[in-house]
Each structure stands twice: as structure tokens, then as C-alpha cells.
Image (spheres, helix red, strand yellow):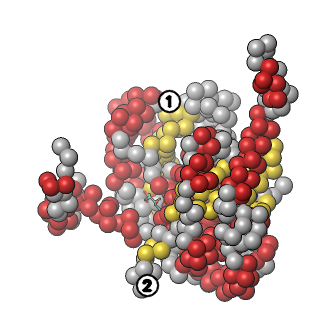
Amino acid sequence: MPLTLDYTCLVRGGPQGEAGVDPSALDRAAILHSSVTKALADKRAAGRLGFLDVPDDGATVEACLKYAESVHGRFENVVVLGIGGSALGTRALHAALSPPLHETAPRNGRPRLFVVDNVDPVMVGGVLRTANPGTTLFNVISKSGSTAETMSQFLLFLEAAKHTLGEHWREHVVVTTDGSKGFLRPFAEANGLKTFTVPENVGGRFSVLTPVGLLPGALLGWDLRALMRGAAEGRDRCLSPSFGENPAAVMAAAQHLLDVESGVNVQVLFPYSHRLRLLVDWNVQLVAESLGKRTSDGQGVGPTPHGAVGVTDQHSQVQLFAQGPLDKVFTFVRVLHHAHDIAIPAPPAGLEDLGYLKGKTFGQLLDAECRATQLALTDAGRPNMTVTFPEICAESVGEFLMWNMVATAYAGELYGIDAFDQPGVEAGKVATYGLMGRKGYEAEKARVESARISDPKYRVT
Ligand code: PA5
């Protein structure tokens, strides 16, 4: 059953009152929809939007499954070395589709998964000590094949694998990278390593449905065919020329209008599901890196993506959401059916006041809190919408990923920016190369070292 979107509480004059999108502005957005879809269709025809085509790439799914089958039962651990778009989708899918607490109690001969997406030495060292190279598969993932964080991790784990395994290290390393660019591809070829390719026209944060996320998924046993089926269905819905039937178009237009017309530019994704919690991090990167841009006339634009997890953040952030500044729009994610549910036992003598919980399930409690919080924020005049998952499964998660990716692409058109580049990230990368002494970056090293960004007058020591 497909996902649904309800945006009743987003339209001005709705149950939430005056904060919201002007209905006539939404009507105009509906009229504009054909030119937005045309702009996207032109980009797709020019070969720039590869993420729209990956759900049809059955051959890659089968290649990932075939490789996973060939090593089934051989590894206790999969260590993914990657960052940003090469890590966040995998983490999100793992939380959503692997059994809970999988790392502490792996099941069905499936390995544990560690995603090393930081260079914090204590964290990296912890993984190094935990994942014995003898029983570990290292999947180094870098589209560019050159990201300093991932390369430094790779050097470390490569050395450990060689030390433990001698010549057999090659059977423990799989490389996922661009077809031609970067350091990894030639290294992999020279050493006869197994490789998977990130399509040239799929950017990092749009690459979760390429081997970036598919290979770890195949190793962990996720239903990749259903994931891609859901993504394909989501894609088709989100390319609909009919605005009212197109969830991505509605989400993008409404959120864009709230930002530019009312200054409501903090977008809170609020899943009522522990399993969907890491979709928040994935979405934060997708939105922030795609839409936080300078327009051609030099204006900084873009929403601030944020996240909360129900029910956990009811005891953390909901006070701010209900009574703080009116700068946020909420996307609740409601789950109707849980794969396993647990009844709450009858209270013993002395705890009779808890009797109202007796016979209810945890799933019912979670859903009640989702509905109650949505109503509370609506009553507090906060614009919000709700995406409903009939259940959490590979298909529904695939559909949700696609909704968000297409919505981000639409929003790029509405803001008048290129959603597919990330020039703001490059400056930091170049400065790091300078500081770390990379050849060719000597001038940058001198510039960074001589930069005056600290004044004793403003230091507390
Ligand atoms: O979305 C992006 O392009 C980035 O976040 C990249 O995924 C991130 O910088 C990692 O890049 P790479 O996969 O080239 O190592």
C-alpha cells in the first residue's frame, strides 16, 4: 500500500489557523507545476538526474545480490568507510530495515554493520579493535574516490587487513566509486579488487539507491527488489503532471512558499518511529546540501532542515515547537502497522492508576502520541503535514526516499538554484588539503595558517 500525504494543516485558514500557505498561492503553484516539471524533464533528458533512473536498474540490484550470495556466511562484520552521501543513506536504511539491535545480536548469518563516517580517532579506533579484519568485509565508498576522510580511513583499515590477512586482504575489500575518476578506481583495478560503480550522473546525496546503499543492503539481507519497486512507484507518482496527485510537488511548493512568503523556513521531519529516525539525518543532508545556495544574484537562500523523533523528542523539543518562534513547518511521519507489537501488561496492586494502559499496545501508544502531538501543534497554530506509512517495509521506505529526492529537485527549481552541486563544501575541503600538506595546495596552507580568525581580546582563557 502506498504512502499518503495529508496537508490539511498546512493551508492558511485550516485547523491550525492563520499560519500556513495562502491557498491562492498554492493554486498558482499548481499552475506553475508544468514549467517546474518541464525544467526537471529537460535536466533529466540532458542526463543530469540519474537518481530518477536508478530504480529501473535491476542489473545492479542483481549484481549486488549475487556478490552478497557469494560471500554469505563468511563475514561477521561489514565496515563501510564513507561520509555524507556515501554513508547517511546506508545508516538510515539499516535502522529502518535491519532487525533492531542487529549489532549486538546479528541474525540469520548476516554480518554486523559499522558505518565509519567520521575521523574521530577514538571512534575509528573503536571500530578497528572491534572488527577483526579476518572476519570483516571493508566496503570503501567514495563517489569522487578522493575524499580525505574516507581515504584516511581506507589507509588505516587497508593496513590492518594486510597485516592480518597477508595476500588474502584483497578478498576483504570492496570498492564502490565512480567509473573513472579518483584514486580508488585505478587502485582497485591494479589490485584486482571487487568494484561497484556509482553512476556518473548520480550525486552523493542522491545515491542511496545505487551500490552505495544497495551493496551493504544485499550483505545485510534487505529486500532490495521491494526497495527499488517502492522507489519506482514513488518516482512515478512524483513525476505526475497533476499537481494535486503529486506529493513531491505539493511538499516542495508548500515548503518553499512558507519560507519565502512567511519566513517559516525551518523544516522539521518528525517520524514517530525509532526505525525511521536516521532518515532525518539523511534528509538533513539532502536538503541542506542541495538547497542551501547562493542564487545568481548573490542572495543566500534555502530552508534549514531539522529533525525530531517521536516519542523521544516530545520530552526534548516539543516545548520549543509549540511555543517558540513561528519559523517551523512540521512533517509528521505516522506508521499505521508495526511488524511486531507488544501488549502493555495489567498493572500490579499499588499501580492501579496505570490501569488505562492495560491491554493497549506499544504501537497504539506510539500512534496515539503521534496524533496527540500533531493536534497539539495544530492547536498551537503550527503548520504541519503528515506522511502516513501503512507499515515500515523496504517498499514504503523506497517510496519515501524518492518522495524526498524529487521534492528536493523541485525545490531547487523553485528557489532558482542548482540543487545538484555543493560549492560551499569545496572551500573547507581545499583548506583541509592545505593544512594537511597535500601537494599542490601550498598556497592554501599559507593562507589558512596566516588567517586571523582569533583575537585575544575575545578569548576566555
Ligand atoms: O552529496 C554529496 O555529494 C556529498 O555529501 C558527498 O557524498 C560527500 O562529500 C562524500 O563524497 P564522496 O562520496 O565523493 O567521498
Residue 369: percent from the left, percent from the top? Answer: 73, 43
Residue at the spot of label 1: 135
Residue 330: percent from the left, percent from the top? Answer: 64, 59
> From this viewpoint, is residue 279 visible?
no
Residue at the spot of label 2: 296
Q: CA distance from mark 1 to mark 2?
A: 51 Å
Of 165 and 417, the residue lying toward us? 417
Residue 216: percent from the left, percent from the top? Answer: 58, 45
- Tell me the amino acid under the disc marked 2: Ser
Of 185 and 440, the residue lying toward us? 440
On-image quarter of the C terminus: top left
Please tell me which residue is depicted at 75% across the width and 47% down the height of the picture.
372
Question: Is residue 344 rendered to the left or right of residue 442?
Answer: right
- Tell me the amino acid under the disc marked 1: Thr
Instruction: Examine the image and state in which quarter residue 262 appears.
Output: bottom right
Please tell me which residue is depicted at 54% across the width and 60% down the height of the picture.
325
Query: Which residue occupies the extreme top position in the image?
Result: 349
Please tell me which residue is depicted at 69% across the width and 77% down the height of the picture.
22
Residue 111: percent from the left, percent from the top? Answer: 58, 33
Question: Is residue 186 rendered to the left or right of residue 136?
Answer: left
Among numbered discs 1 and 2, the one appearing first in the sequence: 1
Please tell me which residue is depicted at 67% across the width and 61% down the height of the picture.
381
